[in-house]
Amino acid sequence: MIGHALTAGYAVLMGAVTGSLLPLALEFPFEWHYIRSIIRVSLHVSLVAVTLSTLCSIPVALLIGFKEFRGKTLVTSLINTGMGFPSVVVGLVVLFAVSNEGPLGTFDLVFTPEAMIMSQFVLAAPVITGVTLAAVSSVDQNVRDAAFAMGGTRIDVALVTIKEARYGIATAVLAGFGRAISEVGSVLIVGGNITGPEGISQTRTLTTAIQLEARQGRFQTAMLLGAVLVVLVLLVNALVIRLGNGGGRYR
Amino acid sequence: MTLSATELCHGYDGDPVFDGVSLSVTPGEVVTIIGPSGVGKSTLLRLLALFDAPDDGTITVDGVDVWAASDQRRLEYRRRIGMVFQEASLFDASVRRNVEYGVRVRQSWADRLRTALSSLSRRGNGDSNVVEALETVGLHERADRDATSLSGGQAQRVAFARALAYEPDVLLLDEPTSDLDPRNTAVIEDAVLAATERDIGVVVATHDMHQAERIGDRVAVLLGNEIIEVGPTEPIFESPSDDRTRKFIDGELIY
């Protein structure tokens, strides 16, 4: 009896799905190559920016974490301030830097993915440096001493510290990626939200596309792009946790 | 190898910790440093382990002044010395990875890469030294356990095995059993004696008089800023020439 009811309910549900939602999905006015090109630009810009930021930030965080020097507190608070730096201001500064009169004017980078990478680099670097710094500073001095006592060189001790702080560093990279891929202000200013002739994105990212589609009233497209953005962030989270985990546990 | 400190003076921020301290350890002997907490036993061991250069005085390995030697030579000397701290301070990895560490850092980068790649594809039993070191402290069956899951006593035994695995010539132990129960203490003390049979010279800093009496061939009494007495353990414990030594051994408050 209950089985029959369930089957019937399921049939009704499936009917509703196929009857109403599926045609809707099929009739969506999406041009998939347009969406795909936006995802590609977004991922390319943010992944390159975060990779470069990580490569620069980890050595800087290790240096600041281990060396005692005058003005260390100042440097640390500057980094922490940088974590919350307004992205539109970063966009403005990068736009000035790459504009014709700016110091990088000769490279002709206005409204290019490279300029967007620069601005996202500037946004992600303080986040990655700051969180990494907190993580490496919390590695016990005794553990570093033990590595040194067992014959480790300064490089070995630094590697041990990175390894001990791996979960914190993974979190830092994630936070940096989250900041980079989900920000609108600077990529809009330096990238210009441009698509090429056949609707292929050149400097249009998920965020700037959502902003444009929503303003033009194409909510379905905007919502889909929003969903893609959320899924991407989730996927990268899962991936980094998996890698940082090494088959063990996440703490 | 013989590790010697001669007329060491050292301090922090202008405060002298000790002044004119001399001590040496020869192969196969156990030298204990006794003295109250905070007297500078750890500082002395750190200097002997070549962590820092002393403010004054010399540290020699087989007669060669270590701090006058090149960085590369000093690294070679440093790698013949093992040190175990009061806290185990294990790495967040398996027991085996912890014990392998000293062996790994002595390999070339190419060899390290090769070892890392081969350990990805299969789980080897690793270096025979690593297995032997773990057997010495009775933990070979726990090689694949997570080091952070061990009890305090087991962790300290792993810390000891870490120092044994790369076969040092001198072993420095900084209050290695002060947090341990009698059974774990006995395991460590047996391992110390086993190490001396392999001609390893051992220096143990301790505030446990009985331990100094049990395992020490010679004892150095560190009090004030100096070593007030040094010599074979038994005569010093039975008839110390310095009155402060007698009071310290008898447990009287002298500081």
Image (cartoon, coloured by chain):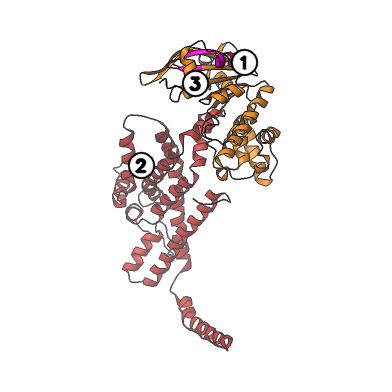
Chain colours: A red, B orange
Circle 1 packing at 10 Å, graded few (<14), some (14-19), many (20+), is some
At x 65%, y 29%, the residue is B190
CB of mark 3 within 8 Å of CB of mark 1? no
Q: Position of residue A211 (x, y in %)?
A: 34, 63
Q: Is residue B104 visible?
A: no
Q: Is residue A129 magenta?
A: no
Mark 3 belongs to which subunit? B
Looking at the image, residue A11 sits to the left or right of residue B111; the answer is: left
Amino acid type at circle 3 is: Asp
Q: Is residue B167 above or below residue A61?
A: above
User: Same chain for marks 3 and 1?
Assistant: yes
Mark 2 belongs to which subunit? A
- The label shown at residue A106 is 2
Q: Nearer the viewer, mark 1 or mark 2?
A: 1
Amino acid type at circle 1 is: Thr
Secondary structure state at the residue bearing disc 1: loop
Q: CA distance from mark 2 to mark 3?
A: 82 Å
Q: CA distance from mark 3 to mark 1?
A: 29 Å
Q: In the rendered structure, which disc, 3 or 1, sits on the residue that comes first in sequence?
A: 1
Q: Which residue is mark 3?
A: B250
Question: Looking at this view, is A115 or A23 the one in front?
Answer: A23
Looking at the image, residue B1 sits to the left or right of residue B22; the answer is: right
Q: Is residue A37 above or below residue A13?
A: above
Secondary structure state at the residue bearing disc 2: helix
Magenta stretch in the rendered image: B221-238
User: Same chain for marks 2 and 3?
Assistant: no
Question: Looking at this view, is B234 or A251 the one in front?
Answer: B234
